[in-house]
Amino acid sequence: MRDNLVVAKPIHEIVKKLQDGGFTAYIVGGAIRDLMLGREPKDYDISTSATPEEIRAVFGRRQARIIGKRFRLVHVRCGKDIIEISTFRRNPDDTGQIAGKTRQQPVPENMIFRDNEFGTAEEDAWRRDFTVNALFYDPVHDDLIDYTGCGIDDMHAGVVRAIGEAELRFEEDPVRILRALKLVGQYDFTFDAKTEVAVRAHGDLILHAAPSRLSLEMEKILKNAYCDGIFTAFHDYGFLQYCLPYLEANWNSPARTYAMQLLAERNSHVLQGRYRNSISLAMAVIALPFVEAEIGLGRHGKLWTKDYHTAANIRRIIKDVFQPHNMIKRLALSAQSILSFQPDFFNPDKTRSKLLHSQGYGHAREVLMLQNAVLWQDDSMVSTWPRPMPASRRHSRSNQKRSRRRKPQHKK
């Protein structure tokens, strides 16, 4: 556990600029966890006493853009990255209803639908979900602030503890249950006793969360390089039945075991910087064993024979695996394409030239190599199917070929 937190220089400069403008500003959320655990944060969130309009005034309209209606945030452009800045908030005064709207089904009494009331830094900390998520860090003055008094100790102990009454926190926002289990699966944390009881007893509250929000959370999980551990935590605490019922129903099957092996191998490659962090690739890896189980040639690693029903079957199985989430169409189509390529790798005499120049070859090859690492361990695979040429070199070669084909121009 690190006590000296080294923050990326552009983030330090953003916090300093807000402070120089007369506002309080801190780094918040998951970045602090990652820094304390010695991991590279995938992104940084900043929270400040400045309102969205004041944040935009500090950075200028070209660099800062206000987004959202129910929950207004500011996106500040920092080179190629977008840094999200929020204003400190406090717990809302009213819960359980949406002004001017009615819901078709009854919802938990304390469910929050408005969460846009500005507050102080301390109020913002106490409205958060877990103590390890309520730490604020000031990189300018190297000050780690723990308003709850438990966050730093819980980080050192690896404990997920709800702030306040756990059942109430989950009723206010059921997605907090999902995020609690993500902490367990991603960081190998454990629950304190009261939080664990609430997680096990109230997992069905997630059924009240907006489907679009849950689909977004699923995309974040699939992009997470620890998602195999997250799905295992979901299963262990009885939550996977609400999140991915198909995977839960097949948890004891050889297909699920193989899927988690492939996913763990993929995650290892992502952490080593060898693979891109692709959602569609993760979807393909999870679905592949179930496609084999239904339309394959008898056992894992034999894949399947392609016919005119294959594409439709793959598409249907991907949809089944990820129900009830409405995954973005392009991601589902990309996963389908990755899987459709797999049998072609075993007929190189006919397909090699075509595959090497296919747009989806890179991702399809990555899934092939994952299977090879887990199952076949065939050294010839790497030489037969080399890494794709970088896009810049492909374009350069293509331009050279076009130049050679041009007819010389004769001077008049």
Image: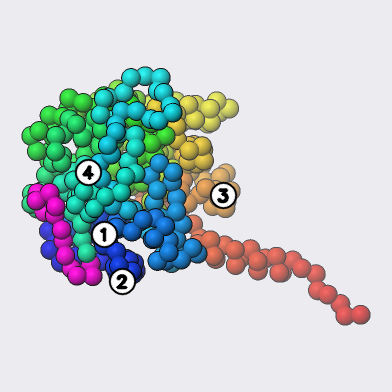
Spatial CA distance of label 4 from label 2 is 27 Å
Reading the image, the residue beneath label 4 is 127
Is the residue marked by circle 1 packed among few (<14), some (14-19), or many (20+) residues within 10 Å? many
Q: CA distance from mark 4 to mark 1?
A: 16 Å
Mark 2 or mark 1, earlier in chain: 2
- Residue at 44% x, 43% y is 69
- Among the 4 quarters of the image, the one containing residue 309: top right
Position of 14 relative to 361 (above/below): below
Neighbourhood count class around disc 3 (C-alpha, 10 Å): few under 14, some 14–19, many 20 upward: few
The vertical placement of 70 against 385, above or below, is above
Q: CA distance from mark 1 to mark 3?
A: 43 Å
The numbered dot on residue 27 is 1
Element marked by disc 1? strand
Residue under label 2: 20
* Residue 326, above or below 90: above
Instruction: Looking at the image, tell me whether mark 1 or mark 3 is earlier in sequence order.
Output: 1
Secondary structure beneath label 3: loop
Give the numbered dot on residue 344. Answer: none
Residue 135: percent from left, percent from top = 18, 54
Badge 4 marks a residue whose secondary structure is loop
Q: Which residues are magenta?
A: 139-152
Q: Which mark is residue 358?
A: 3
Question: SS for tag 2?
Answer: helix
Q: Residues within 10 Å of mark 2 (few under 14, many from 20)?
A: few
